[in-house]
Image (tube, grey):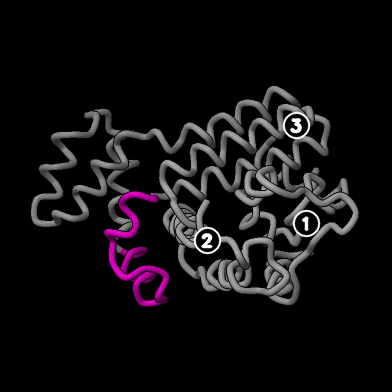
Amino acid sequence: MNLFSKIFNAFKSIRLNDKNSVVGQPLDYLLVSSMYAEQQSAYLNSYETGLSKSTIKTLLEGYWSIYNKEAAAEILLDLQERNQDQYIDVVYDAFENKDNYVTILKSNLPAEEEIFSKYLDVYRNLNNVVPELIEQNVIKDFSQIKKIKDSAWNYGRGAFLSRCCYEAGYLSELKMKEYLRKSFTDLKKYCSTWQEYTISYIFGRALWGGPNNSGMIQIADDLLHNAKSPLKDKKYL
């Protein structure tokens, strides 16, 4: 199934597991994976993804280079730790002070060319991404991004990958559940509501994945408003 088909299916219906559903607080932990799960047309309400073994294998190996337990542990940890990047705040400060952005970046970022260039690219991306998201009515202004950042993009992908790694045998059920719990708990430091979660995810996708995010915006709307969605009647994380 190609990406377009997956996105189309996500708009068409919410996929739920009627046999092994998760309820209560564990469901909230699980729903951190919901944006990525919808992209893949996976179950939203169970640890099982509902995806075929071949699909999971392609996702893990082809997109994430996860072939074993060691690689799974490394990638999953990295996705949780990305939100602790101190230099992102420097870039955000520069974005809000465009007249002095060169001074701000040079004064507060490492001098190493590779690192400096990476964050300069992030700054340049912001100049394209933020106006686009405002035009698409995802955000009203940049202030909505400063706190939530791209946290949901990181925690959300990690949460869904932990489910895939569990099904692939790279993660125990206990470790998966703990990963989901920690992802939820840490996400709450950035996002207060599920709507902020979807905005943060869309922002991360736009910042790191490029333009043309109308599909992600429609997925977010479906998750928040579809009568079948587990997020429909939830507001706060």
Single out the mark in the foreground, 1 or 3: 1
Name the outermost residue toward the top: 70
Q: In this view, does 103 lie above or below 114?
A: below
Name the outermost residue toward the front: 24
Q: How crowded is mark 2: few (under 14 residues within 10 Å), some or many (20 or more)?
A: few
Q: Earlier in the sequence, mark 2 or mark 1?
A: 1
Single out the mark in the foreground, 3 or 2: 2
Give the structural element (helix, strand or loop) at label 3: loop
Residue tagged 2: 235
Give the structural element (helix, strand or loop) at label 2: loop
Instruction: Please give the range of residues in magenta.
Output: 128-148
Where does the image place residue 74, in percent across and percent down from the top left? 61, 26
Q: Residue 67 carries which label?
A: 3
The reply to whether the C-beta atoms of the residues labelled 1 and 3 are less than 8 Å apart is: no
Q: For residue 63, say whether it is visible.
A: no
Question: Is 209 in front, or is 225?
Answer: 225
